[in-house]
Amino acid sequence: MDSVAGEAESARPLRVFFIPFFATGHMIPLVDIARLFAARGVDSTVLLTPANAALVQPTVDRAAAAGLPLRTLLYTFPSAAAGLPPGVENISALPPSECHKIDAASLLTRPDHDRLLRLHRPDAIVADTHFPWTTAIARDLGVPRLSFQALGLFPVCVMGALFRHLPHLAVSSDDDPFLVPDLPHPIHMVRRELPDFLRGDSPITAAMDDLSEGESGSLGVVVNSFAEIESAYAELYFKIDRMRSWFVGPVALASADSGDLAARGGNDPAVAANRERCLSWLGTMKPNSVVYVCFGSWSHFSCEQLKEMASGLELAGHPFVWVVREAAGEAWMPEGFERRVEGRGLVIRGWAPQVAVLGHGAVGGFMTHCGWNSVLEGVSAGLPMATWPLSTEQFMNEKLVVEVLRTGVRAAEGARRGTAAEENGVVGAAEIVEKQKIGAAVGRIMGGGVEAEGTRRRAREYGEMARAAVKEGGSSCNGLADLIEEIRAWPKKAAGKAA
Ligand code: UDP
């Protein structure tokens, strides 16, 4: 390239394509990351299927209206081939027994990714770990592929250690604890807490080699987290897997003004009504008095467990907002429940404006299923958490909150909590966690006493660190700037290597 052409080339804005997986907990943070890139002048395009685009379009439209170079580019979801009805394109839209169809569908999207990436030839691709083939496409195009890790590096390192050493196969029962080797902290788990793909009875196990090949050919991993909680795990990830990582989060904090928060969850009128109801109700409550109870975008409990949870919240006596997403009508609701808790308990059916709720001054605690985004959003809000994981890597995230950060307590201490498979009746039936244990968990984060005070103090401190991380000069703000510079420098580096 001659020097004039070279200068023109470097004056051209960087063009980056982002490809989120078909799960709300993957899509929301990657769109937030695309928005952060756009806020730094990177021409950013998010590849989405139509029904998924609808969930994030308000966020993208707001950014575009503010002059940021952010847009969506649509491709068709392979509904018919995956045996799904038109418009069902996200695991949140399916009962647990059918979620695997979304995984199957994702494997059919390779031709569309291939076509669009070769047509538009971006300068870099940031694709979810579920799309390992984007590494090969990027290699063909001569551009870097970054992998978007929708988890933190703590669970990634825990899973890596389990794959390497298989300590869970050396114990004699599903409930025998074992130490996870290699980690900076002494973390113990039991086999029944592990995701299916680690236990070897899921189709994902077979796809793991492809996933890790996609990872290892990437420039590195973009992570929605921040160094102050996970730097030891970034070092470990590099030491063992030679994977570079960039912390750019918490992205919900980095991108959010109140309008952005209101745009989360899409344009559906029911979502807007919930938002209004929730925030105006919180406006009537005392500071730090309310516990927010939510289990993410696709977890399900049995009706019996929901009934017990209702009684537990009633028993605890603290005001609450409880998000219930069960489609199974109102069979879970104890007789007269909403009337009895009127004025101190609000049940939201469907979708709540979680980040706005967690940031509301009336909220003083969070009962969570420990999805990675929820953990990070709870940490960002400086809130103590009562942790109630159900599946995937959520039991690992619980260890981070309860044992490493010590900003939360295990919900239902001493109880055998059901896994998602048990709650959904796929494998046996879950033992019901009794209302007394649920009430006690709420008391341990919302009540008085030395333990609760200590948990709250640490949570506040991590909340301050999270906010500082995304401010100018903060660790994640610098991480994002470094990453963009690395992408910008890629053609020169690649040319240097070739010479
Ligand atoms: N969320 C929300 N309102 C809800 C449920 C979920 O805003 O009623 C958001 C939540 O803030 C988070 C995401 O959806 O950003 C869920 O991701 P997470 O990793 O916590 O859990 P998952 O749904 O993937 O299990």
Image (spheres, grey):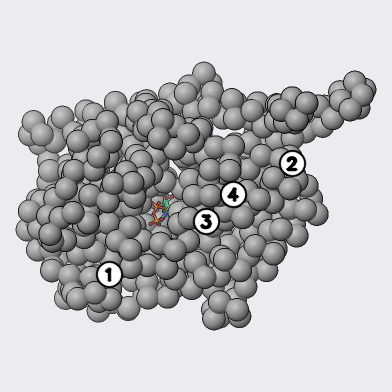
Residue placed under numbered mark 1 in the picture = 421
Question: Which quarter of the rendering shows the N terminus?
Answer: top right
Left or right: residue 44 compared with residue 55: right
Mark 1 surroundings within 10 Å by alpha-carbon count, few (fewer than 14), some (14 through 19), many (20 or more): some
Q: Position of residue 365 (x, y in %)?
A: 25, 43
Give the residue type that dot 2 points to: Gly
Outermost front residue: 499
Give the residue type that dot 1 points to: Ala
| Among the two numbered marks 1 and 3 on one chain, the one whose residue lies closer to the N terminus | 3
Residue placed under numbered mark 3 in the picture = 210
| Among the two numbered marks 3 and 4 on one chain, the one whose residue lies closer to the N terminus | 4
Q: CA distance from mark 1 to mark 3?
A: 26 Å
| Among the two numbered marks 4 and 1 on one chain, the one whose residue lies closer to the N terminus | 4
Q: Position of residue 284 (x, y in %)?
A: 30, 47
- Is 109 located above or below residue 358 in the figure? below
Residue placed under numbered mark 4 in the picture = 127
